[in-house]
Image (cartoon, grey):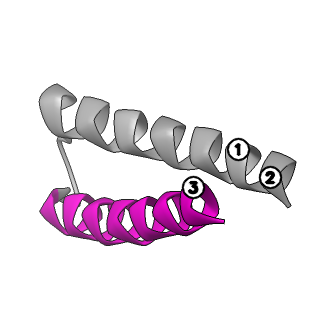
Amino acid sequence: MKRLAELQKRLRELDDEISETKKRLPAHSVKPPVMMDLLALEDEYDALLKQIEKLK
């Protein structure tokens, strides 16, 4: 269960990081590095969700 708790904690952290990154996105002319950061965070988030589902 410790592993599941750690994954869920990281998932919450990623959720916060994704929210913060989205706040940095301008309405127009999105900068590629910011968009790449967001995509990487979302990919990690999705991977963690899959791992959590497998453990349940």
Quarter holding residue 2: bottom right
Judge by depth and name the residue closer to the eye, 13 or 40.
Answer: 13
Disc 2 marks which residue?
A: 55
Judge by depth and name the residue closer to the eye, 56 or 40.
Answer: 56
Q: CA distance from mark 2 to mark 1?
A: 6 Å
- Residue range in magenta is 1-24
In the picture as drawn, the residue positioned furthest to the front comes out as: 2
Crowding at mark 1 (Cα within 10 Å: few <14, some 14-19, many 20+): some
Secondary element under disc 1, as helix, strand or loop, is: helix
Q: Quadrant of the N terminus?
A: bottom right
Pointers 2 and 1 in contact (C-beta within 8 Å)? yes
Spot occupied by residue 48 in the image (x, y as percentages of width and height): 59, 47
Q: CA distance from mark 3 to mark 1?
A: 10 Å
Relative side of 22 to 12, left or right:
left
Judge by depth and name the residue closer to the eye, 46 or 36.
Answer: 46
Q: What residue is rendered at 20% in x and 41% in y?
A: 30
Whether residue 23 is in magenta: the answer is: yes
Which label number is shown at residue 3?
Answer: 3
Which label number is shown at residue 51?
Answer: 1
Crowding at mark 2 (Cα within 10 Å: few <14, some 14-19, many 20+): few
